[in-house]
Image (tube, rainbow, N blue to C red):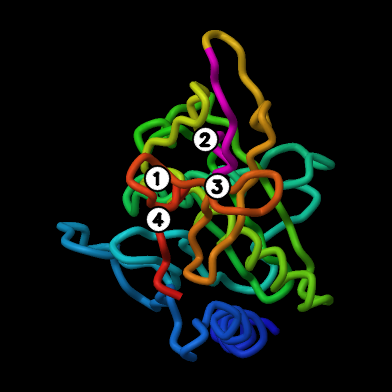
Amino acid sequence: LQKEGDSVRTFYTHVSHPIQLAFQTRHHTPFIVQRSESGPLGPTNVTQTIDYSWGYGERSLIIGEVKRHGIIDIRTWTGENPVDSTRRWLGKELRGYCHMYKCFAASVFDGKYLLILVFHAAAVPDITRQNCPVICLVFSAECTTTLRYGLFRTVMHQIRRMQAAAAPPVVLDGYIRRFRLSGFPFWVYGDAEHEEHPNGYIRILDVSGAWYWASADGNAVLDQDDNVVWDTVQLGL
């Protein structure tokens, strides 16, 4: 692998295609959309394009670029070596694309490594803040199974964030359900926070891709109209 074209072929053959198959519904159709050389999903005035992306509806879950072989210096990104001009340029480019695409995760593949950046921002404008926390992950192409799994889990993390952002309000026994930036719920009662509901309510994953609340015995919690108390929106699986 020497040129960008080599990286492109490797990415789509050994990384992208298997991941897309993992996101098929029980009807054998993908519930998230993979796009190449395209702009943001939905109506947009953005004319710049990204090499690849995965999205749901009009929301981009992760965007990515394919670069020439060797552009990712693992020692620079892991802190072994000082930050150089290439890392500054690449980090700035990914941050800019994430802000433009209203997306919290970006990746770069150079045929040798896959670099993933997850911006731990509460809102899109926070991505451009210099003090915005960034999670950096680097996977070697020598083990494509681990590399694919890392990218797959990142997409899943962004699906949880998307579901949390669109989730209906839930109050059980006076405790208000809220979400962490990870997309996982927690409960608030007054000034106290609880990672789990004190009365033992649990979340159960439905075949539609949505989560609903159930009592400790597994029976779904019903509201005053005898409807299931859903924690997140359905994905149409």
Q: Is residue 121 above or below residue 58?
A: above
Mark 2 to mark 1: distance in Å?
A: 9 Å
In the rendered image, which quarter is residue 47 located in?
A: bottom left
* Up-down relation of residue 176 to residue 214 (above or below): above
Q: Position of residue 53 (x, y in %)?
A: 44, 69
Task: Name the amino acid, label 1.
Answer: Ala
As drawn, the label of residue 217 is none
Quick check: marks 3 and 1 in contact, CB under 8 Å? Answer: no
Residue on which disc 4 sits? 233
Say which element carries label 1: loop
Q: In the structure shown, which secondary structural element does the residue marked by tag 4 occupy?
A: loop
Vertical position of residue 216 compared to residue 36: above or below:
above
Tell me whether the residue at label 2 lies in contact with that at label 1, contact meaning CB atoms closer than 8 angstroms.
Answer: yes
Q: Which residue is mark 3?
A: 213
Task: Decide which of 62, 100 is in the foreground and name it.
Answer: 62
Task: Classify residue 92 as left or right of residue 88.
Answer: left
Which stretch is magenta? 179-189
Separation of residues labelled 2 and 4 (CA atoms): 14 Å
Crowd band around label 4 with a 10 angstrom C-alpha radius: few (<14), some (14–19), many (20+) = some
Task: Determine the secondary structure under disc 3.
Answer: strand
Q: Which mark is residue 179?
A: 2
Q: Answer with mark 2 or mark 4, whichever residue precedes in sequence.
A: 2
- What numbered label is drawn on residue 167? 1
Mark 1 Cα-neighbour bin, 10 Å: few <14, some 14–19, many ≥20: some
| Circle 2 crowding by C-alpha within 10 Å: few under 14, some 14–19, many from 20 | some
> Which of the 4 image quadrants contains residue 146?
bottom right
Nearest-to-viewer mark from 3 and 1: 3
